[in-house]
Image (spheres, helix red, strand yellow):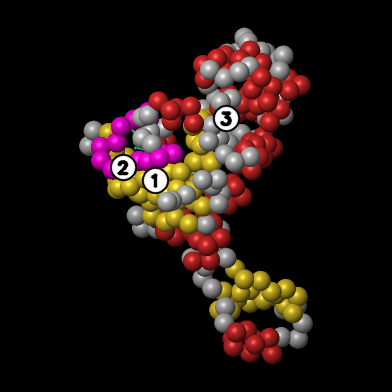
Amino acid sequence: MTDNIISVQQLTKSFGSHKALDNCSFEIKKGEIFGFLGPSGAGKTTTIKLLSGQLHSDTGQITILNDSPFSQEIKQKIGIMSDNSGLYEKMSVYDNLVLFADIYGVDHSHVERVLREVDLLDAKKMLVSKLSRGMRQRVIFARTIIHSPEILFLDEPTANLDPATAQEVRDIIKLLNQMGTTVFLTTHNMEEADELCHRIAFLNHGHVIECGKPEDLKLKYSKQTIELTTQDGKRTIPLNKEKLISELKDIDELLMIHSIEPSLKEVFLFLTEGE
Ligand SMILES: Nc1ncnc2c1ncn2[C@@H]1O[C@H](COP(=O)(O)OP(=O)(O)OP(=O)(O)O)[C@@H](O)[C@H]1O
């Protein structure tokens, strides 16, 4: 018995002669926020389309909620948020969501529930065309979760948002995850991935080049150095007990000491260097 909610084995997908995904494998556990990171064109959106049954792979295997991505039941169990289109501008927030509730065949009482979850209850009568960018993004979220999906696919949900709105979106993602939703998140923003994700996979040229918890990856690729700040300035030494003790003997007044760990961005750049 496995607690994997998604399992992807040796997935390959080509468009003409271009291999968008090349022997791509990874697994996602129930309750995780799983970050799928990589440069433009790495194959992130293609992966979401394959996992959500919008596209067929050439080879490889996908199991999602113990089922195939193409099963009819799966459509009710997943939510996909890919861009900000698809809202009816001349309808109210509430009526937009009623429409999507009807599409999924869920009771209209769910509209109030999702509006509360994304903190839009007070704006339910507003026309979508009058909403701020942040509010609009929250309506899109509400639409994506109207049928209480078990898995959410979020394709760059904070792209092109101002920092405050992006933080609002991240807070909603955290809330939904705390309520039990598994999240598959693509982003170019490594700091966002570090803040949100339990595990991340780095995708490059269509395959996963590294996967793990952000803190484990940073530790794994750390240069194992520490920085000492004294009144004379900073000095960097190897992370080694004997070296530290001998260095400290030399120092009159120590102001600060900390280990230097790379950011996720630095880990990614290191891994893709020369490729
Ligand atoms: N329908 C398609 N027809 C032809 N080529 C495609 C198609 N969809 C994707 N591709 C190509 O496959 C590669 C992967 O695209 P994909 O959109 O999955 O990348 P991505 O990692 O999501 O990029 P971005 O971060 O820019 O959204 C790209 O080279 C893209 O041009």
Compared across the picture, whether 166 is left or right of 59 comes to: right
Is disc 3 placed on a helix, strand or loop?
A: loop
Q: CA distance from mark 2 to mark 1?
A: 8 Å
Q: Position of residue 207 (x, y in %)?
A: 35, 49
Q: Is residue 189 visible?
A: no
Residue 148's mark?
3
| Residue neighbourhood size for the residue with mark 3, other residues' Cα within 10 Å, grouped as few (<14), some (14–19), many (≥20) | some
Residue underneath mark 2: 61
* Front residue of 175 and 206: 175
Q: Position of residue 132 (x, y in %)?
A: 68, 23
Q: Is residue 174 found inside the magenta-colored segment of the image?
A: no
Q: Residue furthest left?
A: 17
Pointer 3 with pointer 1, Cβ within 8 A? no
Residue 7's mark?
1
Compared across the picture, whether 46 is left or right of 128 comes to: left
Q: Is residue 48 above or below residue 270?
A: above
Pointer 2 with pointer 1, Cβ within 8 A? yes
Pointer 3 with pointer 2, Cβ within 8 A? no
Range covered by the magenta-colored residues: 53-66
Q: Amino acid at mark 3?
A: Ser
Q: CA distance from mark 3 to mark 1?
A: 21 Å
Q: Amino acid at mark 2?
A: Gln
Compared across the picture, whether 265 is left or right of 21 comes to: right
Is disc 1 placed on a helix, strand or loop?
A: strand
> Which residue is pictured at 55% across the width and 14% down the height?
102
Is disc 2 placed on a helix, strand or loop?
A: strand
